């Protein structure tokens, strides 16, 4: 087991979706877990940014979640308005699952805009959702975000082995949560990802640990599972993830 939480990385967590947003930020900060607080609507940006600005370890990301695009595409103007206030973008991407398939064209329009604007800025780090749409997501990144112009972290990636390989070749990172270790197919995929492109995440509160919504400090569970998968000590895995984060942020 790995005891010290300080220096762990939760690169995709929805701190504003817990019952007490402020307390969730404070807890992540007190634990010393580097936490990327992704947002789902541009209207949520300001409050997230205010809270994160006061911390050492929490960063807010400006997002427009693909599952909300059908109702919230008009908030793209607000997204634009805040674009220069942060280096971190997310949660953005595509979702071609049955509930969201109808808005896929609109999602693509929004995602293309996000990538093109980020490419122009040149240094953004983007947390990307790709449910049932790994190929389309990678096609968009390839077309609109040259590798020199920004970095992509694929969150909860569930594409095929070939798609994962393509993403690695494109320089993408992967943020991995504990739930992804359920099932042989996804474990196989995780075992093929090079160790230098792995980060950890909780996607809290959408995943649970001991039947409770996962918090940033629970990212230790994903860390231990990754270490186990690769036959490493958790402390070695933690060091690798720290290095990966440093490389990503440089
Ligand atoms: Mn999420």
Image (cartoon, rainbow, N blue to C red):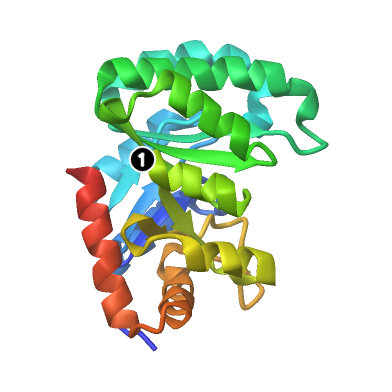
Which residue is at the far bottom?
Answer: 1
Q: Position of residue 6 (x, y in %)?
A: 26, 71
Looking at the rendered image, the quarter that the N terminus falls into is bottom left
Give the camera-side residue of 129 and 194. 194
Q: Is residue 200 above or below residue 168?
A: below
In the image, what residue occupies the spot 45% across and 51% down?
A: 12
In the picture provided, is 81 more to the left or to the right than 104? left
Q: Residues within 10 Å of mark 1 (few under 14, many from 20)?
A: many
Q: Position of residue 160 (x, y in %)?
A: 63, 51
Q: Is residue 163 above or below residue 244?
A: above
* Element type where label 1 sits in the image: strand
Q: Position of residue 156 (x, y in %)?
A: 56, 52
Give the residue pinned by disc 1: 60
In the image, what residue occupies the spot 76% across and 38% down?
A: 97
The number of numbered badges drawn on the structure is 1
In the picture provided, is 156 more to the left or to the right than 90? right
Please tell me in which quadrant of the rendered image residue 250 appears.
Answer: top left
Q: Position of residue 206 (x, y in %)?
A: 62, 56
Please tell me in which quadrant of the rendered image residue 178 appears.
Answer: bottom right
In the image, what residue occupies the spot 32% across and 74% down?
A: 237
In the image, what residue occupies the spot 54% across and 65% down?
A: 214
In the picture provided, is 145 more to the left or to the right than 120? right
Q: Is residue 14 above or below residue 93?
A: below
Does residue 79 appear in the picture of this structure? yes
Does residue 72 appear in the picture of this structure? no
Which residue is at the far right?
Answer: 98
Q: Is residue 178 above or below residue 124?
A: below
């Amino acid at each position: 087991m790995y005891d010290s939480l300080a220096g762990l990385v939760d690169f995709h967590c929805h701190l504003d979706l817990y019952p007490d947003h402020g307390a969730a930020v404070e807890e992540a900060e007190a634990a010393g877990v580097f936490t990327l607080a992704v947002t789902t609507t541009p209207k949520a940006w300001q409050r997230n940014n205010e809270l994160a600005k006061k911390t050492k370890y929490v960063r807010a990301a400006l997002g427009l979640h693909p599952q909300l695009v059908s109702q919230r595409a008009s908030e793209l103007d607000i997204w634009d308005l805040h674009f220069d206030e942060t280096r971190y973008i997310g949660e953005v991407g595509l979702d071609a699952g049955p509930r969201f398939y109808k808005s896929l064209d609109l999602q693509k329009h929004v995602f293309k805009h996000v990538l093109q604007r980020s490419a122009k800025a040149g240094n953004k780090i983007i947390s990307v959702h790709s449910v049932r749409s790994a190929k389309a997501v990678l096609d968009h990144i390839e077309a609109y975000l040259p590798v020199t112009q920004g970095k992509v972290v694929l969150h909860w990636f569930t594409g095929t082995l070939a798609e994962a390989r393509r993403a690695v070749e494109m320089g993408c990172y992967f943020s991995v949560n504990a739930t992804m270790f359920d099932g042989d197919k996804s474990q196989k995929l995780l075992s093929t990802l090079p160790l230098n492109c792995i980060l950890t995440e909780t996607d809290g509160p959408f995943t649970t640990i001991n039947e409770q919504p996962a918090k940033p400090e629970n990212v230790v569970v994903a860390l231990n599972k990754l270490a186990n998968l690769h036959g490493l000590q958790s402390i070695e895995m933690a060091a690798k993830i720290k290095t990966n984060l440093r490389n990503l942020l440089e």
